[in-house]
Image (cartoon, helix red, strand yellow):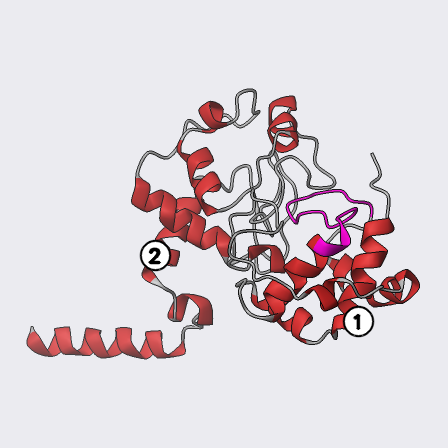
């Protein structure tokens, strides 16, 4: 009997050694794995991942940092569209709140799911979805619903720097990196608009990133690469842009 059991164990081990193993699952975090299992209830309506497409609900790639109801190619309910217009931007807390009670958080949503009451399951599910939101809007900083305006934590910028007269044409040349995230039209889709800001405000925020008083690593890197005259030029360019309706 013992010999038979030992033989069976060897056979199972041999099969396991030659079975393909997903690198993601092999090294998966227990919470992410819990979230993956929780997502099985979601995938009848939603997809996430490299080949995700819209189904009954929109795909969930890059959802964190995005304003609700604004993903191209999907027709949202009036309730969800209105929620976005009223300032709902998906961060981890908002996504968890919606998953807990969708129709309570967004009245009028088409989502028929009753909700996930278990806080640990919600946290795991959000952690799983977060893997597919790697963009700059998902970098740690202030909550996405708060505009990136000057704040009490921003340092005072010396007057001789704030008074630099920037060249708007040079600012337009430099702006190509900015508008990969911020909309030149002034439209806010989860990443705050920087169009039409006063020059002093734009310069103050950029220097707060440059001096590392603000935390976003992408903005810190960009600001650190800019000279004072270049920040002034960007400020002059974006200040003179008119927001489109």
Q: At 42% across and 29% down in the image, what residue appears?
A: 101
Q: Residue at x 56, y 58 (%)?
A: 154
Q: Rounded to the nearest whole Å, what is the CA distance between mark 2 and mark 1? A: 47 Å
- For marks 2 and 1 on the same chain, the one whose residue lies earlier in the sequence: 2
Q: Which residues are magenta?
A: 185-200
**Residue sitting farthest toward the front:** 159
Disc 2 element = helix
Q: Residue at x 50, y 25 (%)?
A: 112
Does the segment drawn in magenta span residue 191? yes
Relative vertical location of residue 191 with respect to residue 219 in this rendering, above or below: above
Using residue 146 as the reference point, say whether residue 119 is left or right of it: left
Residue furthest top in the image: 108
Q: Position of residue 100 (x, y in %)?
A: 39, 33
Viewer-side residue, 91 vs 49: 91
Question: Residue at label 1?
Answer: 229
Residue at image position (45%, 54%) is 128
> Which residue carries the number 2 mark?
31
Q: Could you tell me which quadrant the N terminus lies in?
A: bottom left
Q: Residues within 10 Å of mark 2 (few under 14, many from 20)?
A: some
């Amino acid at each position: 009997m013992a010999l038979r059991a030992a033989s069976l164990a060897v056979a199972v081990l041999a099969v396991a050694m030659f079975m393909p193993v997903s690198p993601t699952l092999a090294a998966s975090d227990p919470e992410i794995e819990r979230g993956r299992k929780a997502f099985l209830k979601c995938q009848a309506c939603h997809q996430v991942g490299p080949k995700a497409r819209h189904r009954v609900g929109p795909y969930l790639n890059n959802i964190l940092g995005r304003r609700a109801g604004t993903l191209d190619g999907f027709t949202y309910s009036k309730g969800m569209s209105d929620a976005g217009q009223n300032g709902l931007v998906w961060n981890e807390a908002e996504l968890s709140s919606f998953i807990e009670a969708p129709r309570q958080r967004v009245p009028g949503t088409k989502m028929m799911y009753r909700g996930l009451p278990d806080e640990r399951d919600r946290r795991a599910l959000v952690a799983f979805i977060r893997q597919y939101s790697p963009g700059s809007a998902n970098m740690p900083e202030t909550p996405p619903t708060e505009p990136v305006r000057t704040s009490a934590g921003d340092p005072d910028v010396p007057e001789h720097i704030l008074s630099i007269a920037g060249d708007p044409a040079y600012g337009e040349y430099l702006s190509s990196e900015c508008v990969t995230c911020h909309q030149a039209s002034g439209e806010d889709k989860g990443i705050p608009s920087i169009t039409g800001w006063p020059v002093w405000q734009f310069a103050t925020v950029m220097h707060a990133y440059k001096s590392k008083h603000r935390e976003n690593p992408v903005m810190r890197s960009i600001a650190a690469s800019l000279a004072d005259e270049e920040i002034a030029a960007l400020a002059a360019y974006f200040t003179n842009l008119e927001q489109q309706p």
